[in-house]
Amino acid sequence: MTPTAPITQDVLTLPRKLPEGGLTNIVGLTRDQLRDALIAAGTPDKQAKMRLGQIWQWVYHWGVRDFAAMTNLAKDYRALLAHHFTIELPEVVSKQVSTDGTRKYLVRIAGGHEVEVVYIPETDRGTLCISSQVGCTLTCSFCHTGTQKLVRNLTAGEIVGQVMLARDDLDEWPVQGAPKIETRLISNIVLMGMGEPLYNFDNVRDAMKVVMDNEGIALGRRRITLSTSGVVPEIARTATEIGCLLAVSFHATTDAVRDQLVPINKRWNIATLLDALRDYPGLSNSERITFEYVMLDGVNDTKEDAHRLVELLRGIPAKVNLIPFNEWPGAPYKRSSGNRIHAFADIIYQAGYASPIRTPRGEDIMAACGQLKSATERARKSSRAIAAEAGLAHG
């Protein structure tokens, strides 16, 4: 059978948006890229390292967007920066706030395309779910985002910009002279929004380097989780070049079912994927792989599935996040019953693996896992059409 899932990305990443006058946007440039850009704009080589550090702190620690406010730089140098550079974020088109406090932002990027970003406040953390592509190429049949065709990859600046605009909305930038606030409203980032991050590896890596940098936003690598459907050739690179934690959209215990739910399985099946995960650099009990498993009524939720999952995970430091299916208009599946989910969780737990059941968040604003889809692309397909695409019989 010829695999239908793409082996590598074949989609465009649009160049960094150049506003009127051809100004370069600083947001998303790595330290090396920004240093080179500063020198090209006329910064003397000997000053470049110092200037880089100053600008980096203004942009990513203090959240300043106006070069004129960078008061430890000489006025003529601030003018030089304003002549060559800009500090721009994607545009927030709309914001919705759920009854449970979840916030969903519709964000417009270059070319007029839109992605969604979700902030989930909890008692012990605040998690920001960010997107890496407009749409998605993987067409996972239970995922609302997967019904939207892939448009393009996001640039590093568009990925970092999602973090910065959420900090704007939460008023989280520190104030100069004010006491330092230790509590982070955005304490964790998950690359679980729209798109497959490992099909946009270079931009995701560069963006996370910016986010993790200690002199700026300063989120540690263990505060960042990248979720993949199983792009096997890029998995080891995630550990060595990004260093963040890994989550895998698993969702099935046989190739027959996973082929249907996660079509990339036709390219890299369960055995191939698990071999790559067993070899994941730095794997330990403190840095486990998270297996995401959406609970679909009558599809993947039997006790036999639970026992098979335990066998598949043997030898991999892991935890299993059980996700009650978040239904969306036209979805070809139903959520498993609470009893089914708890019985499944108990089998996983008794085998020695953490098996938390994720509490659905933001369902009233379509912000829950698997529900993200930009408004401009939210064409209403009939449940019959979606079921046909998913290869399911639908009465």
Image: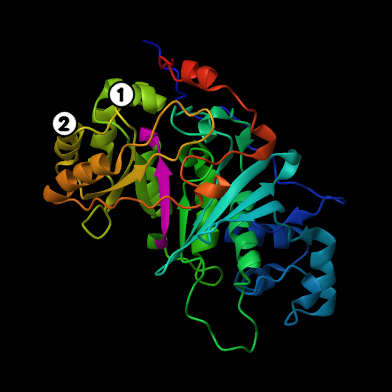
Q: Position of residue 151 (x, y in %)?
A: 63, 31
Q: Which residue is mark 1?
A: 257
Residue at 85 percent of width and 62 percent of height: 83
Q: Which residues are magenta?
A: 223-233
Q: Quadrant of residue 285?
A: bottom left
Q: Position of residue 222 (x, y in %)?
A: 37, 61
Q: Position of residue 54 (x, y in %)?
A: 65, 75
* Label 1 Cα neighbours within 10 Å, binned few <14 / some 14-19 / many ≥20: some
Q: Which residue is mark 2?
A: 304
Residue at 41 percent of width and 45 percent of height: 227
Q: Is residue 9 magenta?
A: no
Question: Residue at the right extreme?
Answer: 21
Q: Position of residue 258 (x, y in %)?
A: 32, 26
In the image shown, does 176 or 357 lie closer to the viewer?
357
Residue at 47 percent of width and 20 percent of height: 387
Examine the rendered structure and indicate whether residue 240 appears above or below residue 258: below
Give the amino acid at mark 2: Glu
Quadrant in the picture for the C terminus: top left
Give the amino acid at mark 1: Val
